[in-house]
Image: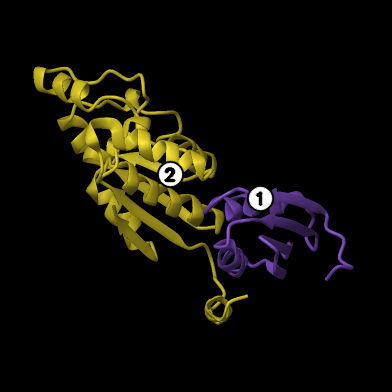
Chain colours: A yellow, B purple
Amino acid sequence: MSTQLDRELEAIAELEPVEGRKKISMVVMSGDMDKLFGAFLIGTGAAAMGMEVTMFFTFWGLRAIRRSDAKTGTTFFGKMIGMMYGGGIEKASPSKFSFGGMGRWMFGKMMGAHNVMTLTQLRDLAIDLGIKMYGCQMTMDVMEIPQESFVKGVQDPVGVGFFLGEAQESQITLFI
Amino acid sequence: MSDVTPDLELDLRGLLCPMPMVRVSQNISKVPVGGIVRAVATDAGSMADIPAWAKSTGNEVLQAEKSGSEFVFLVKRVK
């Protein structure tokens, strides 16, 4: 065992034991593959540690909770967004090395080789672990993405007031 | 610790962060309070993660040991 690890384990041992249930609230604004990985890794990890987890999806982040077969948009612009930014979480591209889809394919191959779960599997695991996921009503309206286009297990849409209420009760808040 | 008989064996080899910790948390309730889960992982990060999980959830890590390229944990369900 390395001395670095010894120090980390000592630091963990010195932590105060938890009283009550701790809570984490996240805003997920990004639809980038790498950032969604971060959000769901932290979310599932926190749920495993017994924390209450709430995730709020807004703007590009809405992709993470959308069904892959959902057709969205009612107006011309809305349909255009639906076409150009269509698909579900499996369509998320990395924020760097995107190369018009090549990056997603390459990262997918590399992560598969290292036995990392796919984003879709992680998102579904998050739902199974009881993580509460919400769509932001305002951005859903603007981007014409209805609640019906979301995967099963997503809660009814909310606004910023609800998020702030949750955030106030949280020991950890993240904006991704 | 070799005299401890685990109530449940978990093969977490090949799983990466955060899955070893997630699997331990999903399976701990399968043993009775006081029961022991023996988990074998290959993710080096789990040496820090699983003790942190135990601290946070109020369970006890009886052993966290590197054995070759594997990491062996004995986790006792406390509550």
Quadrant containing the C terminus of chain B in the rendered view: bottom right
Residue that label 2 marks: A132
Nearer-the-camera pick, B2 or B23: B2
Q: Nearer the viewer, mark 2 or mark 1?
A: 1
Which amino acid, by three-letter code, is at mark 1?
Answer: Leu
x, y percentage for residue A93? 29, 37
Relative side of A171 to A57, left or right = right
x, y percentage for residue A3? 56, 81
| Location of residue B46 by image quarter | bottom right
x, y percentage for residue B56? 57, 67
Nearer-the-camera pick, A49 or A34: A34
Identified at 61% across, 68% down, the residue is B51
Relative side of B45 to A86, left or right = right
Mark 1 residue crowding within 10 angstroms, few (<14) / some (14–19) / many (20+): many
Relative side of B68 to A28, left or right = right
SS category of the residue bearing label 1: strand
Which amino acid, by three-letter code, is at mark 2?
Answer: Lys
Identified at 32% across, 48% down, the residue is A35
| Location of residue B52 by image quarter | bottom right
Quadrant containing the N terminus of chain B in the rendered view: bottom right
With respect to residue A144, does A111 lie above or below?
A: below
Q: What's the chain of the residue with tag 2? A: A
Residue that label 1 marks: B12
